[in-house]
Amino acid sequence: MRPFEYHRATSVDDVTAGQIIAGGTNLLDLMKIQVMTPSALVDISRLTGLSAIETEGDGLRIGALVTNSALAYDTRVRAGWPLLSRAILAGASAQIRNKATTGGNLLQRTRCPYFYDTSQACNKRSPGTGCAAQGGAGRMLALFGTSEHCLAAHPSDMATALAALGAEVEIHGTNGTRRVPVQDLYRAPADRPDRETILEAGT
């Protein structure tokens, strides 16, 4: 693995160039097998204001750094939105849930076996190289929302539950703050499966 820089963000303004890391449960796995090789990591795990679950109207406001365990076991979530709690608890081991964050869960990369195998062609990992999943083993691949360039399924059980519950994602960037439905956060693969969300530089 090639050397990289590590920065600890102390405010949102510190989150500039580099791959963001908090719990690291997905990113570190990908770095170990060279699927992702960022030149810099920006640790946002200690940013203030992103680790709380707060009541907002008749719903909840969930910070991006709330751990999966904290969210799944929150009494308000279990009582009012049990679908979300069950989805989280069904999705990973207790050890992973204790580290994984809400933001990281929603933005995790695919579990497609061809994406993880750097000897295979993958347009999501390396745009323009092809999709080895086309005509390959279909287990764990998507049936809907695919294209000729990508068959990968999104791995987040939490995202599916939040979409079913009508949740929104708040996006803060250089052009201000906006909210979008969870399902609108994601892009269909089309001809650029490497562009997985609507997030742009500066958000």
Image: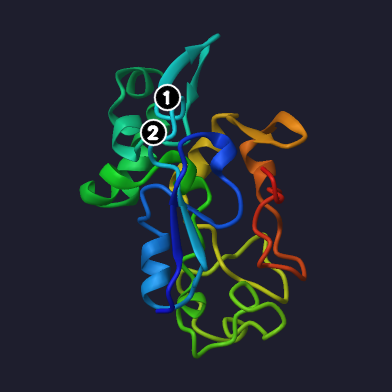
Q: Residue at x 71, y 58 (%)?
A: 188
Residue at 61 percent of width and 55 percent of height: 17
**Would you call the spot at circle 2 few (<14 residues within 10 Å), some (14-19), or many (20 or more)?**
many
* Quadrant in which the N terminus is drawn: bottom left
Q: Which residue is drawn at 70% across and 54% down?
A: 187
Q: Nearer the viewer, residue 174 or 124?
A: 174
Secondary structure type for disc 1: loop
Q: In which quarter of the image is residue 33?
A: bottom left
User: Marks 2 and 1, how far apart in space?
Assistant: 16 Å
Evaluate if marks 2 and 1 touch, with contact meaning CB atoms under 8 Å apart. Answer: no
Coloration mode: rainbow
Amino acid type, mark 1 = Trp
Q: Position of residue 134 (x, y in %)?
A: 62, 83
Residue 147: x and y, percent? 72, 70
Relative to residue 12, is residue 44 drawn left or right?
left
Q: Mark 1 points at which residue?
A: 81
Say if 121 sits above or below 12 in the image: below
Along the polypeptide, which appears first: circle 2 or circle 1?
A: 2
Extreme residue in the bottom direction: 119
The residue that label 2 is drawn on is 66
Quadrant position of residue 126: bottom right
> Dot 1: few (<14), some (14–19), or many (≥20) neighbours within 10 Å?
some
